[in-house]
Amino acid sequence: MTILHLRRARTSLVLDARGPGLPRVVHWGGDVGNLDDDGLRHLVDATVPPVVPSSFDEPTVLSLLPELSAGWSGRPGLAGHRDGRDWSTAFRLDGLDVDQPADTAALVTVRASDPAAGLALTIEIALDPYGLLTIRHRLRNDGDSAYELRELTPVLPVPAVATELLDLTGRWCRERSPQRHPWQQGAWVREGRHGRTGHDATLLLVAGTAGFGFGHGEVWAVHTAWSGDHVTFAERRPTGESTLGGGELLAPGEVRLGPGESYETPLLYAVWSDDGLDGLSDVLHSHLRARPGHPRSPRPVTLNVWEAVYFDHDLDRLRALADRAAQIGVERFVLDDGWFRGRRDDTAGLGDWYVDESVWPDGLQPLIDHVTGRGLQFGLWVEPEMVNPDSDLFRAHPDWLLAVPGRLPPAWRNQQVLDLGRPEAYDHLLERLDALLSDHPGISYLKWDQNRDLTEAGHHGRPGVHGQTLAVYRLFDELRRRHPGVEIESCSSGGARVDLAILARTDRVWASDCNDALERLSIQRWTGLLLPPELVGTHIGPERSHTTNRVHDLGFRAATALFGHHGIEWDIASISAAEQTELAAWVALHKRLRPLLHAGRVVRVDHPDPAVWAHGVVAGDATRAVYAVARLATSVTQTPGAVRLPGLDPARRYRVRPVADVPVPATIDRSAPTWLAAGVTLTGAALARLGVQLPALHPEQSLVLEVTAIG
């Protein structure tokens, strides 16, 4: 065996795989240089901890799977038993497969076993060309009796210089709320027991050096790519070790491996940066954009008609909305909830995926033909995983539910959950969705919703979240195989199913059911920590938000929605001529900027005034950029100070000016900075270090700036 050094994009992973036990991570973080075998041995020697009084007689080291047999007293990497036996393991290294091509991911497969426990372990590690690390464990039961698995979790060490933690929490309509605190001794554990990713799920759990921000500091982060119950944690031991990890959260008895059966963990994504949080996003966004299945065509500007008509489906009214949408420049029209049998409100009909003949006597085709005839794509809302008790499907198959015998889980939005681990329920859903798309080839987009937690989710008397999650993945995969041209949005009462496993099967996420532009600034900022703008639906809502009752002018709403997969969630058939003109201008601006917004590098500004937020996107060649500055509230000082514009080429000169396509917001500042009218030309270094003074925007106003390289 050997010491392995994986290097990609300024990131190093050093593994001591000399045996006889499992490999340990000697270093994960910044590049340690081109070390030969002798240099790697010295590096390993330099990192072995000392033997201290009242401790083990040999140094304890942390392997890729922490074990009690190695002296580890923190969170276990593996927990399970065989009727009370084989609860502790001592894996021995059997072999390594290493592939380090020059221009793609470096891959390592570790093979290990514990014959006494009757278990075999495979660990797959990849470091991609952008510096993104992924780890996955696979456990096989080689014994002659069942093995009950409670936990199998990849873990990575983090150096002691990381002294702060940042993660995200939230709720419906306020997803992605950041929380930050010192990293002290003990475990900071984020568990999601929702049966879905959850509104409160942390997209990334970040550890970093003191005071790290968007543009500065050294940071390490992990993401658990799983759409069911999961755990992500940071642990600091009194013995000195600090770790980040994550995996699936299993219920008692949920995974019971028979002889020869295997369990595979979700992928744990891990990323390091010495350029702060934006550096993490650079790596993640680059990885996602390089996927073979990443959306390549321009992301269509979308009109979703939910907040325009709700359940009131009228063909003439919807045609009028499509006509107005085409005039404004919309490219995709989505018919939301209410089109299927018995669905006049949210108490009935879920599960009966047939067009409601009483509302649509001629079916959906007349609307589809009208929409596509105006040059728009047609999309449709579905919520296949759920069922209303008031539905034909429930009445025919009350046993098709995720539930414990003898009782139903608490109702949620008048819904229960179909048990897709039952082949007959799975086959029924697949047949209905396949028929819907086959009978209506004009449907090119599904808004796939999932509006409740999986509570007391039983499958044949045993916990069923694990099987349900895998069945949902299979359903997505098979539907995509049969209809490869149909795009799918992951919506889960807003942002409750946002993770990289669901995004391997979908084309974007709906970040939140809240379209209030002020709330959306934060939701989108922190969703963007993981996802690039083109994967996040960002819509212009109505003047008065139906979730917060706040009122915002069109400019603020539109500037907030500009930086994502753009769309509209508003009754545009009832707006004034002036609003229609301005809305069309914002749509045109987005289309003009779309190649930049959906391919460039996302930057977020660390501004000292919490009332001022700024963010932008910079082209890969640094020739162009667009920034938005938003005033969230009044400031303590009379003016908030200049706003820096990071991410540009320090040596180049740039012209900065407000975008000319849309009106500059009216402000209370009677003497706006002189440069505002004609623009200003400065070097990238000056813009990053000094920035520009802005007009005194009202609270809840935004200014969009366009930056163009000169020469």
Image (spheres, rainbow, N blue to C red):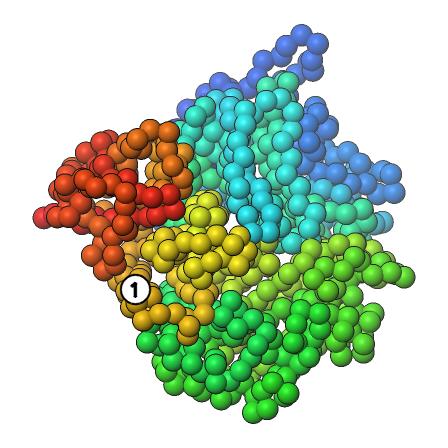
Between residues 513 and 85, which one lies in front from this camera angle? 513
Q: Residue furthest right?
A: 406
Q: Residue at x 72, y 42 (%)?
A: 151
Residue 700 visible somewhere in the drawing: yes
Mark 1: give few (<14), some (14-19) or many (20+) Cα within 10 Å: some
Figure check: 155 above or below 69: below
Q: Residue at x 62, y 50 (%)?
A: 198
Helix, strand or loop for disc 1: helix
Q: Residue at x 49, y 70 (%)?
A: 308
Three-letter amino acid code of the residue under disc 1: Glu
Residue 48, how many percent across, how many down?
A: 55, 19
Residue 263, how many percent across, how many down?
A: 70, 51
In this figure, which residue is indicated by the disc labeled 1? 582
Q: Residue at x 84, y 58 (%)?
A: 404
Residue 298, how many percent across, how many down?
A: 35, 66
Q: Quadrant of residue 474 in the image?
A: bottom right
Q: Quadrant of residue 476 in the image?
A: bottom right
Q: Residue furthest top?
A: 53
Between residues 103 and 445, which one lies in front from this camera angle? 445
Between residues 339 and 382, which one lies in front from this camera angle? 339
Residue 624, how many percent across, how many down?
A: 22, 50
Q: Residue furthest bottom?
A: 362
Between residues 572 and 368, which one lies in front from this camera angle? 572
The reply, left or right, for residue 375 in relation to residue 622 is: right
Figure check: 647 above or below 507: above
Quadrant where the N terminus is found in the figure: top right
The reply, left or right, for residue 595 in relation to residue 237 is: left
Q: Quadrant of residue 155 in the image?
A: top right
Residue 264 visible somewhere in the drawing: no
Number of residue marks = 1
